[in-house]
Amino acid sequence: PNPFPERSGPGIAVVVNDEAYLVDFGPGIVRRAASLSPEYGGDIAGLAVEKLNHAFLTHLHSDHSVGLPDLLLTSWVAGRDRPLKLFGPEGTASMAENIIAAYEEDIRYRLYSDQPANNQGWRIATTEVTETGIIFKDSNVTVEAFRVPHGSWPDAWGYRFTTPDKVIVISGDTAPSERLLEYAKDADILIHEVYSLEGFKKKEPRWQKYHAGNHTSTHELGELAAKARPKLLVLYHQLLWGSSHETLLEEVREVYDGEVVSARDLDVY
């Protein structure tokens, strides 16, 4: 969430049978995906820019959603020939409509100039998530949404992906959550946000109050993981505040003895 020069914004890709399912799209999402695709030296065919067809938004905070225009338009220009399937909380449809309106002239020019362009890839098929349960299913994945507590935010979601060989749970931004624990039980991979207790002590009291009600500390996450017992715990959306990835891991391991890693951009699990 912080503007580290060497990192892009929050974004996760679940890739199954060369089909990518994105969870959140912070700044840099398209170029990070492209860097792992064969065209740009990577080996994950499902992350080819023109194949980015599915996106799931956990909540509407800007650090998780500001990459949507890039995801929509760059993928279209690169060759996506179908509407982007977008899932997210109430307000997602309005965001999508306003982005299309903001880029109306760009879209019009590409459609009606000499530039080769299809008339589908700039469109968005939006489904707003309003209830816990299955929100999407195809031959690769079943996606379940569950509410998570993110301060006073009225509508924030985590997602559980069941693939032919794995169960992957993604927290989104959340304070400690019993509902999330229920969905994360025995998952193959739990990808969970976290903040450093060492860094937390350096924050002003009003920021401490905010973060304690909106996010999950290393010890809180370790306690949750000890109950959920995922095969792999992946820390993401790390709030370091002058701390380090190594300190995050040390803090989690004070209360959790399972396998845990602190993710960097472009990591693959």
Image: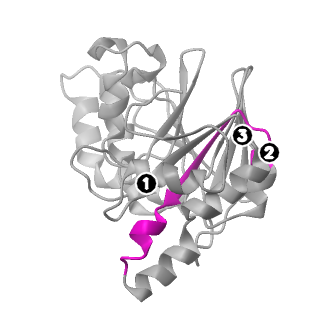
- Taking 267 as reference, is 62 above or below it? below
In this view, the residue in front, 97 or 191, is 191
- Taking 91 as reference, is 233 above or below it? above
Residue at 54%, 15% in the rendered image? 18
| Upstream in sequence: badge 2 or badge 1 | 2
Between the residue at mark 3 and the residue at mark 2, the CA separation in whole angstroms equals 7 Å
**Residue 169 in view, yes or no:** yes
SS for callout 2 = loop
Between the residue at mark 3 and the residue at mark 1, the CA separation in whole angstroms equals 21 Å
| Upstream in sequence: badge 3 or badge 1 | 3
- Residue 241 in percent (x, y) is at 34, 65
Q: Amino acid at mark 1?
A: Thr
In this view, the residue in front, 138 or 125, is 138
- Taking 148 as reference, is 140 above or below it? above
Q: Which residue is mark 2?
A: 185
Question: What colouring does the structure picture have?
Answer: one colour
Q: Which residue is mark 3?
A: 230
Q: Is residue 197 magenta?
A: yes
- Taking 177 as reference, is 250 above or below it? above
Q: Which residue is mark 1?
A: 247
Q: Nearer the viewer, mark 3 or mark 1?
A: 1
| Upstream in sequence: badge 3 or badge 2 | 2
Between the residue at mark 2 and the residue at mark 1, the CA separation in whole angstroms equals 26 Å
SS for callout 3 = loop
The quarter of the image holding the C terminus is: top right
Q: Evaluate if marks 2 and 1 touch, with contact meaning CB atoms under 8 Å apart.
A: no
